[in-house]
Image (tube, coloured by chain):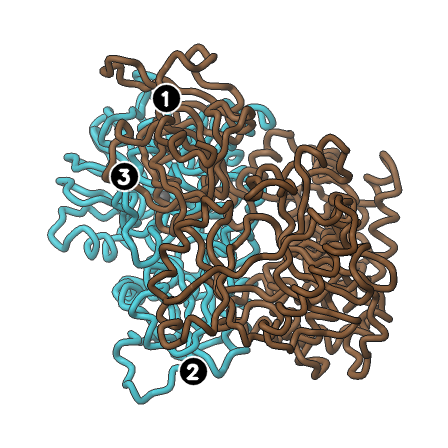
Amino acid sequence: MLPPGALIQHTPQGLYCPAADAWIDPWRPVPRALITHAHADHARPGSQVYWAVGSAAGVLRQRLGQGIDLRAVAYGQELRLGDATVSFHSAGHVLGSAQVRISAGGETWLISGDYKRDADPSCVPFEPVAADVLITEATFGLPVYRWRPGQEVAAEIAAWWKQAPERPSLLFCYAFGKAQRLLAELHQLGLNEEVLLHGAVQTLMAPYREQGIAMPPTRPASELPRSEPLAGRLVLAPPSAHRSVWMKRFKAPQTGFVSGWMAVRGARRRRGYERGFVLSDHADWNGLLTTVRQSQARQVYVTHGQGDVLARYLREVEGISAEPLSGGFAAERGMEGEDLDERQKPEGQEAPLEKAGEETPG
Amino acid sequence: MHAFCNLFECLDRSSGTKARVAALAAYFSEAPAADAAWALQLLLGKRRRRLLTGRRLREVCLGAAGLPEWLFDACHAQVGDSAETIALLLPELNLPAQEPLDLPLHQWMAERLPALAALEGEAQAQAVLQIWASLPPPQVFVFNKLLSGGFRVGVSTGLVTRALAVVSELEEAELAHRLMGGFEPSAAAFTALLCPTAGSEAAPISRPYPFFLASPLEPERLQADDPAQWRAEWKWDGIRGQLIRRAGTTFLWSRGEELVNDSFPELVALGDALPDGTVLDGEVIVWPAAAERPLGFAALQRRLGRRSASRALREACPAAFVAYDLLEAGGRDQRLQPLAARLQALGQLSAAVQAGAADTIKGCLRLSAGLPLESWEALEPLRSQARQAGAEGLMLKRLDSPYLAGRKRGHWWKHKLEPMELDAVLLYAQAGSGRRANLFTDYTFGVWATAGLEPAAGSVDPEPAAGDSVRIEPSAAESRPRQLVTFAKAYSGLSDAEITALDRWIRRHTTERFGPVRAVEPLQVFTLGFEGIQRSSRHRSGVAVRFPRILRWRQDKPAAEADTLAAAEALLEDG
Ligand SMILES: [Zn+2]
Ligand SMILES: [Zn+2]
């Protein structure tokens, strides 16, 4: 738990900085929200004023409403909020994602939000930031999670697509972030054939194109004339479309799923996709450790996923004071701190006990 | 091994039957016979000896990795499998690079793996590490699996047989027959298996016929038929067996193709009394000679658990063979004869045995009697008497049916009793393994019992996984305190969506943890179905159920309205 009187406090609305009178990624409406990125579990509607990086504005407005009061800042730009100095630093997670740095009273805290350390042609690379106290995510906080470079995985995906010219290739991935990263990675490989998109992916293309991210040409699958053959086409769709009515249009497709969770065989098999490709927009085990070390933080708090494992490792092996931020935090966060594997609601059905939120990224 | 690992990966991920058969056929036609033979053995899921335990592999990995044990265990909990956990953690070991190793599968299976197992201590650890360093990660996984005896491929024998049929151009049924009774993984055996001309002379005398299996009844398919064309029998609650007498030797095979001669010496004695060249299909069951009906499955289980049966056990639980088909007579295959003719021959054979054999043997052979069935309307009333007869339902067989291999619908139907049902409360959950690692899928349920019956002083048994326990009802509103007594464990029956939702619920309503087991708030009610219920002194509830499974998640029902132990006892078969 965060100590009483600390720069950042834990409140029912989420992480709160009294000095700045601002909440970071609050899960309930607040007067002033600092948003690390536009994924649904970090950016929620209803707050009076939002602060976020300029390149996140497009997606944020799309998701929270065009009329929100959004104050755009640049990476690294220092803001004076109350008694605190606040700045946003690239997190390398998705377009416009940021870590939030807050200083007041001679102390600096860094809230990582979601981040990754691997190269991603669809967003600005991660910036290491030093702080006294670090609040880091640990979605993939186990040493079994170790990513290969995105280009290698993209080449694997391209090979999978190309070896099945007689079938449509349906590739499932999170609509915001992962889909655009895949497109940008394919573009880097020199593949510039038109890729078809599910509607959920399509709506996120404009913000990326506006930021000048180089991607192959794309078209909503729904706009393709019925007469045009689908065999040999690559189609990107969110996991919620798997086994849905939408899929009926594609005859005998091969299916793949792109996610960090696909590193584990059990998770691969349970999902029922033919192929699992291991590509994540979160840091892997080494990425987490590197980030903690580079922050030089004397105190680390861990949220999301394997918080207790990473914290214990930092304490016992790295000799860094670390604790999981658990309890209400993980629970309020929705499913992120809870179930590691099935955060996505089961395809096409509502889970009976709990309303699963919008897709959360893996 | 490279080709075999590719096959494994291909089977592991593609769900389409066509693609799987094609991958298998491609492998079998390209692999050298010695490798194909081992691959076949592995694909058929024939249990391989465990050469090294998963625990030993873990020890070797930890010794080299400098990883804390608890961290390995946290990884294992996420992955659900030691072999895979190690394969994923391998980069953490920073092993010195080795020359890549690609030995043929048969060399691994016949030489390298047994040699590794024969090593000890540090020498063994070093040898394992060297192999890990010389294999690409997917092969490390397969290697670990082969070494620890846990290698499984989710592919049915039927599918493998089909692929072999494609490669050899033999009939699937012929191949199924040739594969019965075990397959020795040698190049010669594989070549003989696919040989177009290999006749029955080449077959080992122990080889059983593939069992013909019944399908669950589809009543609408019977309506057009005259009931007189059908034979009704009880569906016995034992294990399917094939009793073979050939060349002066007796073999008793279970449906799982295990030779169970040692467990049932009295049935071997019965086999010895059969004429040479005889094969019977029937049910192995515990049935005292003078009794009107067989004892329950629990009695049979006592016999199955033993490698050899003591005299006392044989007297307490005497085995019988309830014959219902004759597959071979006078050394000739009878399977294409119509059922009516086979049954007639079986009757004559039985009469001859009963006339000539010793008294101790006579009681061991019973015939499964035909039941009167004048009309289809009589079917349900007949089935409802199954429990009194000590059976689990009805069998319906067309009198003109041949004895086919495997499950071919239309000739034989099974019509089991509806399962018994009780509503029980979820008490404990444990993560599954394999496909379900990482999800809570193994559940323990309780029913209400009046407090005071139980020895425990209220709180939770610290080892719920191993046995049974008691939980006091949280609300003390009841005038007489009641408590939940563990009653059954069940795994299957929920949809994937329900499993996911329940998993989430469990994580949020955990009250205590005991290693991998979580106690949860006793709030969720499930309807459990089971095939039978018997008294058991080993269970704290005093009863044991057979084949428990989840039928429905009763989200509409409060825990207080779940069933009681008294309701369970009312279902007791001896009650
Ligand atoms: Zn995110
Ligand atoms: Zn997140």
- Image quarter for residue A335? top left
User: Is A145 on the left-hand or right-hand side of A17?
Assistant: right
**Nearer to me, B387 or A92:** B387
Question: Which residue shows up at 56% across the image and 53% down it?
Answer: A265
- The residue drawn where x is 16% and y is 35% is A30
Closer to viewer: mark 2 or mark 3: 2
The chain letter for the residue carrying disc 2 is A
Q: Is residue B87 left or right of residue A213?
A: right
Horizontal and vertical percent position of residue A158: 51, 72
Which image quadrant: the N terminus of chain A? top left
For the residues labelled 3 and 1, the Cα–Cα distance comes to 49 Å
Badge 2 amino acid: Ala
The label number, if any, that marks residue A25 in the structure image: 3
Quote the CA–CA distance across marks 2 and 1.
62 Å
Colour seen for chain A: cyan
Label 1: few (<14), some (14–19) or many (≥20) C-alpha neighbours in 10 Å: many
Q: Is residue A147 above or below residue B93?
A: below
Per the image, label 3 sits on a secondary structure element best described as loop
Which chain is indicated by disc 3?
A
Identify the hue of chain B: brown
As drawn, B511 above or below B197:
above
Give the residue type that dot 1 points to. Answer: Ala
Residue shown at the point (32%, 31%) measured from the top left:
B563
The quadrant of the picture showing ligand 2 is: top left
Q: Amino acid at mark 3?
A: Asp
Whether callout 3 and callout 1 share a subunit is answered no
Residue B545, x across and y down, in percent:
48, 37
Judge whether residue B6 can be spotted in this image: no
Q: Which residue is mark 2?
A: A231
